[in-house]
Image (spheres, helix red, strand yellow):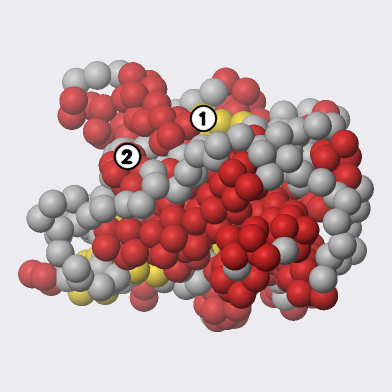
Amino acid sequence: MSENKAPFYITTAISYPNGRPHIGHAYEAIATDVMARFQRARGRDVRLTTGTDEHGLKMYQTARDQGRPTIDLADEMSGYFRDMYARLNISFDHFMRTSDPAHHAASQALWRAMEANGDLYLDRYEGWYSVRDEAFYDESELVEGGGNAKLSPQGTPVEWTVEESWFFRLSNYQDKLLALYNDNPDFIRPESRRNEVLRFVEGGLKDLSVSRTSFDWGVSVPGSPGHVMYVWVDALNTYMSALGFPDREGEWGKFWPADIHMIGKDIVRFHTVYWPAFLMSANLPLPRQVFGHGFLLNRGEKMSKSLGNVVDPMELAERFGVDALRYYLLREVSFGQDGSYSAEAIVRTANADLANSFGNLAQRSLSMIFKNLDGKISADYSPAQDDADLLADLTAMATERLPREFEQLAFSVGIEDWIRAVFACNQYVDTQAPWALRKTDPERMRAVLMTLFQAVRMLAIAIRPVVPAAADTLLDQMGIAEDARDFAALADENWFAKLAASGFIVGQPVPIFPRLELPEGEGDGEA
């Protein structure tokens, strides 16, 4: 594959911390982290931004009901997200809070730019507002709930709201947005989300209310006392404030526009209609792609507090291990589509792929070198055709096929090819039977074991973005330097000879993937 060395910028959605993080937050963070780690391994200078969107009516009301300052609630809830990112090994570069003074300054700069372009005006808002979604909805979008109640398209309660508001001339951007989608087919992915947005914009755009006066928890509107910015102007700008905007030098100048905004499918409209329109108005570069992934379903059901099936990702990580959870979510869920999971499915996949297949391959390969060759490795051997064929296949997987799929966010496809390569290596072990060769042909045994050592290294480096801790533990045991675990290292044809010449000795290997057991009382239901 051709190498792209340009700086790479990727973001998660900026989570609204009115509750503790759930498995959906973890899923998005893991996928974004895998992409960031993958691009770093490709040699690109990467920035990953995440954070918390702390303004809005929900936070204000919750804090008021608890009798505490809103910033105290924001500090507490934002901390839970930081804890989750640390526990799940998320390699973020920036954690931006919308309550940060630097973010306020950035949002006011964006506001002034839109105002200077003539796209903001003061008027009176009357319409349906969902506190839970922090969104206004047209009458035509509402659905009927029980007792003739009106609900948003997401099924959340709406209330009739009347107040003075600043408006953004979104109606002026319909043609420009349609041209953007037409000229850049990959701006919105996957295609199903793109089609939804196209239909929405083609149906006509109304001007958008972008300020509130009913509460003061937010970014103050410049020159308009009593108004705070409506949450989406504020929240979406986090992607730029994290890079130091409005300073146009430094990180913003290097990394903006974002290569990928990774978000849930329920907020695609805000990111692909409002956000590019704001940026067009401010004469700023647009992000290159917005990817709206699907939902995670608990045994096929959407998670909700009322059903009592909301799952704490910290609990899953504690029960099954961080790397096993990361692997399962990207292996079993076709990224972009809805996916289902269960405790049984996590255990089944982790044991089959990681413990029984890759973990066992690594353990027995290093063990045989330790026991039969006193841990010594040597590049001085004569490979047979079977050896060369295996390594050629693994090289193509690790340097061409898996990277091609990961570049397109087709994580499950790339991982499927990786596990196929693992199976091929295990088949190679069974066919070559090095334990038998020890007595009949020691030199052939050494060639087989040296081939396996090289194969295990390649497999570990290829899957490292997904299971970084386990891969590093294995590579440590193999004497692979920390700065030699990327795709450039895979292209180094002399690495094995240099390692052998260094005198490195393989020690007694330590298993990297323990077999998982279902907690007592859990059934054998399907995912």
First of labels 2, 1 by sequence position:
1
Q: Amino acid at mark 2?
A: Glu
Q: Secondary structure at mark 2?
A: helix
Q: Circle 1 sits on which residue?
A: 97
Q: Are marks 2 and 1 in contact (CB under 8 Å)?
A: no
Element marked by disc 1:
strand
Label placed on residue 360? none
Indicate which label's residue lies in the foreground, 2 or 1. Answer: 2
Q: Which mark is residue 318?
A: 2
Vertical position of residue 41 compared to residue 152: above or below: above
Q: Residue at x 60, y 28 (%)?
A: 103
Cα distance in 3D space between marks 2 and 1: 27 Å
* Image quarter (top left, top right, bottom left or bottom right) of the N terminus: bottom right
- Which residue is painted at 29% across and 44% down in the image? 319
Q: Quadrant of residue 371?
A: top right
Q: Position of residue 442 (x, y in %)?
A: 72, 58
- Quadrant in the rendering for residue 503: top right
User: Who is closer to the viewer here, 179 or 471?
Assistant: 471
Q: Position of residue 37 (x, y in %)?
A: 66, 46
Q: Quadrant of the C terminus?
A: bottom left
Please say if 191 is above or below 64: below
Crowd band around label 2 with a 10 angstrom C-alpha radius: few (<14), some (14–19), many (20+): few
